[in-house]
Image (spheres, rainbow, N blue to C red):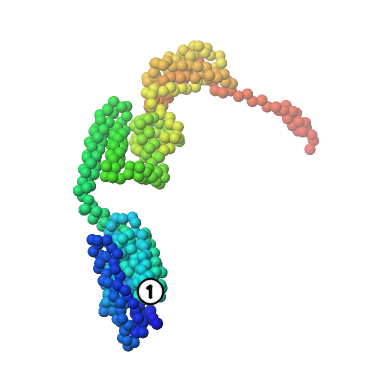
């Protein structure tokens, strides 16, 4: 007995080969129509040596396909061509895949008495492996059946992504059509949950805006807080609605947490600026129009956004500082109070009457328009310098920079002119210069000049 298998896939049967093909009874439960599509296999009598068996459709092998991917090939059996046999098996596989079942283990059921084996999923027969198949692939029936079972299980377990999505979508739609009535209470409950979420979110947003009228913050901060409340209510309501639909609360919360962590790591700097902006808007270390000093920048606050704070410097430049740096920096707010203290230093002669001088300076400072009478100006003797007695003059003026500089200049001018009119000297620093060895140098020069040439 010899079998010749050519590379082109043709099967030529030698007339001397006696092939015994036994009919395969289908082991299926009652009511399964697909399992009866494969016709029974009848024994084939030996043929004369000069006769060849050629399939009627011109194909010697046909593909077994799972989710659009060929797994293995089968040949013809008796009067059933390879194409017809593959179509029957593929329809059974499609029926298995259309069912939402987790157990898709393919088992091999051998029948030694008939020299065949069947591949089954549960009680459902997929196909029969005959002695003809064993001769075609030069393997024992049980070994070939086990090989095909392993290939089918791998195909079930690792389907292509796009095809798997399509199959799942199709099966989901089919199941949804079948279970519409059963799922109707869940959909109604989820719809009611979303409706209640919308009502609560809108009500809390309006309540927040109404209650924030007495807050000492600007309108942008009030709108920001109301939106945060609105969004938080919607997040909670969406989780509740999905739970009503049957999704696991633990899975939803875990997914939300992992998503938040991933977003936080990828947008760490951006989110840091935004959260810093929220804290700045809530704590209000400065307001629009305040004149502040942040790091090396000094100017007027023109805009406070969630990402950055804008300063307009006194020389006409615009500086955008990220809120993360603003939040961690030392901020000096020059206009947080309406008035701030300024000071100048005056040096008087040691022979001057200090008490009289302090009274003259005090009156001169109060005479300048813009100097606050309360608190009263302070005149303090701060230092006994080399040639002068240094007196510090402290007084309070408006904290706005332009007014502050102008009044400070006017006070310095008034003090200088008043002291001069009162005859109080304001000497400059006196330095004593001593020349050592000057006489010795003169004597030597005189002696040298008397020497003859």
Q: Which residue carries the number 1 mark? A: 134
Specify the quadrant of the image occupied by residue 235. top left
Specify the quadrant of the image occupied by residue 401. top left
Q: Quadrant of the C terminus?
A: top right
Q: Quadrant of the N terminus?
A: bottom left
Q: Residue at x 64, y 25 (%)?
A: 433
Q: Residue furthest left?
A: 181
- Is residue 234 depicted above or below 353 in this figure? below
Q: Residue furthest front?
A: 113
Specify the quadrant of the image occupied by residue 218. top left
Q: Nearer the viewer, residue 280 or 139?
A: 139
- Number of labelled discs? 1
- Residue 36 appearing in the image: yes
- Locate residue 278, reporting x and y percent: 36, 35
Q: Nearer the viewer, residue 383 or 157?
A: 157
Q: Nearer the viewer, residue 200 or 9?
A: 9
Other-residue count near label 1 (Cα within 10 Å), few / some / many at <14 / 14–19 / ≥20: some
Q: Residue at x 76, y 31 (%)?
A: 444
Tell me the element at label 1: helix
Q: Residue at x 35, y 72 (%)?
A: 114
Q: Residue at x 79, y 35 (%)?
A: 452
- Is residue 151 depicted above or below 285 in this figure? below
Q: Nearer the viewer, residue 370 or 229?
A: 229
- Locate residue 272, reporting x and y percent: 40, 40
- Locate residue 264, reporting x and y percent: 40, 43
- Locate residue 370, reporting x and y percent: 37, 20
């Amino acid at each position: 007995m010899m079998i010749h298998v050519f590379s082109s896939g043709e099967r030529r049967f030698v007339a001397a080969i006696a092939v015994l093909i036994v009919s395969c009874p289908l082991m299926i439960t009652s009511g399964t129509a697909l399992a009866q599509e494969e016709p029974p296999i009848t024994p084939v009598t030996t043929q004369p040596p000069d006769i060849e068996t050629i399939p009627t459709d011109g194909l010697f092998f046909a593909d077994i396909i799972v989710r659009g991917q060929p797994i293995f090939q089968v040949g013809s059996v008796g009067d059933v061509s390879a194409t017809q046999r593959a179509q029957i098996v593929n329809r059974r596989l499609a029926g298995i895949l259309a069912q939402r079942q987790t157990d898709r283990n393919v088992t091999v059921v051998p029948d030694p008495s008939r020299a065949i084996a069947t591949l089954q999923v549960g009680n459902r027969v997929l196909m029969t492996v005959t002695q003809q198949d064993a001769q075609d692939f030069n393997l024992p029936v049980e070994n070939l059946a086990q090989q095909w079972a392993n290939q089918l299980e791998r195909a079930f377990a690792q389907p292509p992504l796009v095809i798997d999505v399509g199959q799942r979508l199709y099966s989901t739609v089919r199941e949804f059509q079948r279970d519409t009535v059963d799922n109707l209470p869940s959909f109604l409950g989820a719809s009611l949950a979303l409706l209640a979420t919308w009502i609560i979110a809108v009500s809390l947003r309006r309540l927040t805006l109404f209650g924030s009228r007495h807050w000492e913050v600007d309108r942008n901060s009030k709108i920001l807080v109301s939106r945060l409340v609105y969004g938080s209510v919607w997040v909670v309501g969406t989780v509740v609605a999905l739970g009503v639909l049957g999704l696991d609360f633990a899975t939803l919360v875990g997914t939300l947490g992992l998503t938040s962590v991933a977003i936080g790591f990828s947008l760490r700097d951006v989110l840091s600026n935004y959260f810093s902006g929220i804290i700045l808007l809530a704590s209000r270390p400065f307001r629009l129009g305040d004149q502040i000093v942040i790091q090396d920048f000094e100017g007027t606050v023109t805009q406070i956004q969630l990402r950055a704070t804008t300063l307009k410097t006194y020389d006409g430049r615009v500086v955008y500082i990220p809120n993360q740096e603003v939040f961690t920096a030392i901020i000096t707010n020059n206009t947080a109070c309406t008035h701030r203290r300024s000071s100048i230093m005056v040096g008087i002669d040691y022979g001057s009457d200090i008490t009289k001088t302090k009274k003259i300076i005090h009156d001169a400072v109060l005479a300048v328009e813009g100097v606050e009478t309360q608190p009263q100006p302070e005149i303090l003797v701060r230092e006994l310098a080399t040639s002068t007695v240094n007196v510090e003059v402290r007084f309070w003026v408006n904290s706005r920079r332009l007014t502050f500089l102008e009044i400070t200049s006017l006070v310095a001018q008034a003090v200088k002119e008043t002291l001069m009119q009162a005859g109080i000297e304001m000497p400059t620093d006196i330095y004593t210069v001593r020349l050592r060895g000057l006489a010795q140098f003169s004597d030597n020069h005189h002696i040298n000049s008397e020497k003859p040439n």
